[in-house]
Image: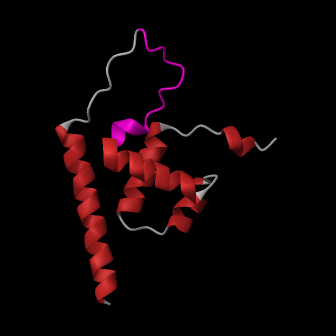
Amino acid sequence: MNASKNRKYSYELKKQVVELYFEGRPINEIVDKFHLSSRKRIYEWVKKAKNDGFSSLQDHRGIYSAGKKKKEKESLEEENYRLKLEVAYLKKLIALNRG
């Protein structure tokens, strides 16, 4: 059985990966740096962070819904930070397209 198939990634690692993606780092470089199992994993984390904030990257498996609090929305500081990263990423894309 492949050991990386069931690998769990920490919240801090996921957040760092998403931040590097928003900064415009190449996907292959991120995969190699963090020894990720696939590029698809990065795209999944980025989608989660864009839709629901960085807090959505936390692992909630094993928590029973009976005692579970309602999903907390990301704080304004987290949202502001995420949006700043997205703006920086988009600025780099525009600069690259202009040549």
| Residue farthest to the right, as pictured | 1
| Residue drawn at 25 percent across, 72 percent down | 91
Q: What secondary structure is the magenta-colored segment mainly?
A: loop
Image quadrant containing the C terminus: bottom left
| Residue farthest to the top, as pictured | 66
Tell me where residue 98 appears, x and y as whole percent.
28, 88
| Residue drawn at 35 percent across, 61 percent down | 22
Which of these two is toward me, 14 or 63? 63
Corner quadrant of residue 71: top left
Q: Is residue 38 left or right of residue 75?
A: right
Magenta-drawn segment? 53-66
Which of these two is toward me, 87 or 25? 87
Image quadrant containing the N terminus: top right
Which of these two is toward me, 17 or 64? 64
In the displayed structure, 50 sits above or below 72; it is: below
Tell me where residue 75 appears, x and y as whole percent.
21, 35
Q: Is residue 1 visible?
A: yes
Which of these two is toward me, 39 or 77? 39
In the displayed structure, 73 sits above or below 66; it is: below
Q: Is residue 53 visible?
A: no
| Residue drawn at 26 percent across, 36 percent down | 74
| Residue drawn at 38 percent across, 37 percent down | 56
